[in-house]
Image (cartoon, rainbow, N blue to C red):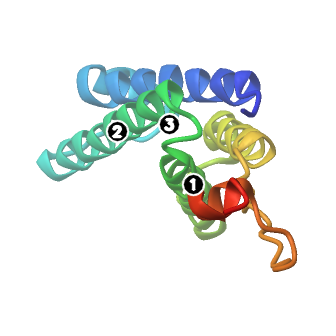
Amino acid sequence: MQNTRSLRVVLALAFVLNLTWANLFAFAPGLVERLYGLPLLDGLHAYLALSRAAAFLLLAVVSLLAFLRPVGFRAMTVVLLLAYFCFFLVDVIVLVRGQMTFGALLPEMVAFVLLVAGLVRFVPVVQNNVVKEDKSIISQNEIAPSQRNGS
């Protein structure tokens, strides 16, 4: 059994951050406006903020499930890794287009990089059992009962 304590710490942090971001986007749009320096102008912006909240809520659930069984739900850890990497790429694209300032995006970009690094470092590795094909060695279970007693 692998030691998954470090991975569980990263997944717990991911759960807390995702839940925090989901609450911010869903219930505190005024705070989101101040943090990002962009006003939520109309219904479409509010809809997109709620969509981002739903995405973060989904990631919080995935990180909680992966926290509960890190080795069994290894695929969920990989999904979290890909999601944070994609969010980081979105931030880079927004910066390149000049749509937001670097200072507004820096905290979440650092969080995404640290989460990705932690998940990559501590993701459980599945080791395949090596099967030797040595036919000269036969275990006692493979010998018929009549042959064991010498008859």
Q: Amino acid at mark 1?
A: Val
Mark drawn on residue 140: none
Q: In terms of secondary structure, where does tag 2 sit?
A: loop
Q: Which image quadrant is residue 55 in?
A: top left
Q: Residue at x 87, y 77 (%)?
A: 136
Graded by Cα atoms within 10 Å as few (under 14), some (14 to 19) or many (20 or more), the crowding at tag 2 reads few
- Residue 138 in the image, given as x and y percentages of width and height: 78, 67
Q: Is residue 67 above or below residue 93?
A: above
Q: Position of residue 130 (x, y in %)?
A: 80, 66
Q: Which residue is mark 2?
A: 39
Which residue is denoted by mark 3 in the rendering?
Answer: 36
Left or right, 13 with reference to 125: left
Which of 151 and 73 lies nearest the eye of the viewer?
Answer: 151
Q: Amino acid at mark 2?
A: Pro
Amino acid beneath label 3:
Tyr
C-alpha span from label 2 to label 3: 8 Å
3 and 1 marks in contact (CB < 8 Å): no
Q: Secondary structure at mark 1?
A: helix
Q: CA distance from mark 2 to mark 1?
A: 34 Å
User: What residue lies at 25% left-to-right and 28% top-to-bottom?
Assistant: 26
Residue at 68% x, 39% y is: 115
Looking at the image, is mark 2 or mark 3 nearer the viewer?
A: 3
Residue 136 is left or right of residue 126, and the answer is right
Q: Mark 1 — residue?
A: 78
**Residue in the foreground of this view, choosing between 69 and 65:** 69
